Image (cartoon, helix red, strand yellow):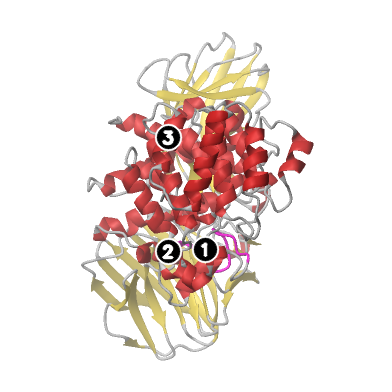
Amino acid sequence: MTLSQDLYLQKIYGGLLGKVTGVILGAPLENTFWTYDQIKNAYGEITSYVRKYKQFAADDDINGSLFIIRVIDDIFRKNGTITSKDIGNIWLNYISSNRGMIWWGGYGKSTEQTAYENILSGIKPPVSGSIQKNGKPLAEQIGGQIFVDTWGLVFPNEPDKSSYFASLASSVSHDGEALEGAKFVAAAVSSAFSSDTIENVFIKALSYVSKDSEYFKILSDVYHFYKKNPTNWREAFEYLLKIKYNDDLKYPGPVHIIPNAGIVALSLLYGEGDFSKSICIATMCGMDTDCNAGNVGCILGVFKGPEGISETWKSQINDSIICSSSMGSLNIIDLPTISRYIGNLNRVLHGEENAKENEINLDFQFVGSTHGFKTNHSEKILMRNIEDPYDSKNRCLQLILNETKGYTIIDLYRSFFYIPSDLDDEKYGPMFSPTIYSGQEISCRILPNNIPNGTQLIASLYAKTANNKELISEMRVHLNSNEWQFLKFSIPDSEGEAIKEVGIRIYIQGKNNYYGPMFFDDFKISGKVDYYIDFSKQPEEFGSVRQFSFNKGAWRNINGVLDGTCSDFGSIYTGNFYWKNYDFSTTITPIFNNNFGIIFRCRGNLNYYLLKFAEDNVSLEKHTFEGKLYLTNKVMFKTLLNNNYNVRIIVKEERITVFLENQKIFDIFDENPVDSGCVGYMIFNGTRITINKFSLKEI
């Protein structure tokens, strides 16, 4: 079946929404603390979330699914192929050592950590995840199937390709039965795009599992039990998971894939195509609840589409997820935007276009989407996504108000940066860099209906920093009934602080209640960044210093400057992953040893330019997945401890120009450039540095 582009994207969105819903539902009830019987006795029949989160900090299920798939953009786009070694490089590129992304439970205990450290030490995939290297118990844990849903999303109605690449990706860290799980889950997601029943999805996906595997056996047993006893899922669980496949010696480890595979199968079949019923069964079964409900949720989300997921589940997510990669700007995600990115990856696979997500364009075109917007009066305002009443081909955000008599201020806003108080926990080590900056322009359009006589509505745009300083537009628009009106605002100097929030402020004044509705659409952020960082305003948080993500080293704010030290190596990053042309100035001071560098156009731990300082020279290097390349001869320059060094780097298209102490030291043309990326610093061999000046302007 051929999918229209719109339907394809809607179903990607449904799959991601379903994945996140299942993970959030299951996360509080994992088998670390809960069993099937305890869940049953405490909650009975689960029909909704068991915990409310301010903002859920993504765990390994979501992190892995969204970042491993970037191999298509980072490597396939250039080489036209994908190997397990390529996917291993993606691990090293986006995962910070001992922080974020995966479960750091210890080498030999956490399958993913074991594989990561194997790759880091030179043991390449697929040996890094093999039974031969790590042993059968470790290699056959559930991680083999929890990161692979997105392979089904990029290969709609192509279960043969999705299962192949899912197995390839899983082989980086897993082996044996775990690879069968990868094939099944990815094939199920792919098949769900056009199948007419969830039973057919199950049967199709099962056909990609090796018939002599234990994975095939348990799924077949679940299916046969279901066909004979199709009404009571608890009977199936009691027989299959508490009796027949309840063998810790045969299925060892904290989360072996086989019993959890049975739960996924049971939930799909007994859920009968109902999204809520399916993910709730997966959760009530216990074991690895977030993984199982997440996989089931993605399959059902694609099958049903976003319209098949009730507001009960959507409202807590509010389209907003955060991740834990080493690239801070990529960790702030809204589901519609990442859905479009995944849709573009499908086009990259077919040679049609590059996958880019550097523009912020929030247009509410996905059914039910909010792009993470909130209001300051949630108790008085109903916010929902609807079809544009003035254009049936468009969708927008609708606000219905209550109790707005007199003088009322309504803020409709979204977070583009996070601080610790925004989150419930930091279990998976999130880190953030801002995604909007001084110098950029905000724009949107708004339409109020039915403004009563004697009531006045005035709107303006605003931004707010992480320290709660408000930057309010001087452009205030008097709103007219039944008329779309445009607003725009150039973000002024934030005085070295991170921009955390932007939105539209509506002033309502009148003797009568105003109920609306109001319609909001086409929120865009464009223009060139022009900002600096005042380190005295950046507290230590998320294991580093505000606005920075990192990979190894100790990074602190000491006496109002950024201070970095390491035993062997460390790197720290800030800025936007998609910055291309810019003029970057900084002042760096070596305190102990003098092996350090400035990173620019950085696209991960392995992919960047490096201006590298040694004791008596400076060099310019390019690092890619293929290795290191010196771009020109070294320049002799002696660095002295406790001396300040002023550096200016200008990158424009293929040209790189570097000034040191106002003297041009490099001016080169790179025919095959790293085409965009953030900036940062790197330290080697126990070096300690401080940074007290930082400014950047896009050109």
Disc 2, SS: loop
| Residue 540 at x, y percent in the picture | 64, 63
Q: Report which quarter residue 343 is drawn in.
A: top left
* Residue sitting at the far top: 453
Residue 649 visible in rendering: yes
Q: Residue at x 61, y 28 (%)?
A: 312
Look at the image and tell me in which quarter the N terminus lies. Answer: top left
Say left or right for 641 vs 170: right
Q: To which residue does mark 1 refer?
A: 139
Q: Residue at x 45, y 55 (%)?
A: 179
Is residue 307 or residue 184 the one in the foreground? 184
Say left or right for 253 vs 442: right
Region rendered in magenta: 93-105
Q: Marks 3/1: CA distance?
A: 27 Å
Q: Amino acid at mark 3?
A: Val
The mark that comes first in sequence, 3 or 1, is 1
The mark that comes first in sequence, 2 or 1, is 1
Disc 1, SS: helix
Q: Amino acid at mark 2?
A: Gly
Disc 3 to disc 1: CB gap under 8 Å: no
Look at the image and tell me in which quarter the C terminus lies. Answer: bottom left
Q: How many marks?
A: 3
Q: To which residue does mark 2 refer?
A: 604
Judge whether residue 644 is colored magenta: no
Is residue 247 or residue 145 the one in the foreground? 247
Q: Marks 2/1: CA distance?
A: 27 Å
Q: Residue at x 32, y 59 (%)?
A: 581
Q: To which residue does mark 3 refer?
A: 201
Q: Amino acid at mark 1?
A: Ala
| Residue 15 at x, y percent in the picture | 46, 37
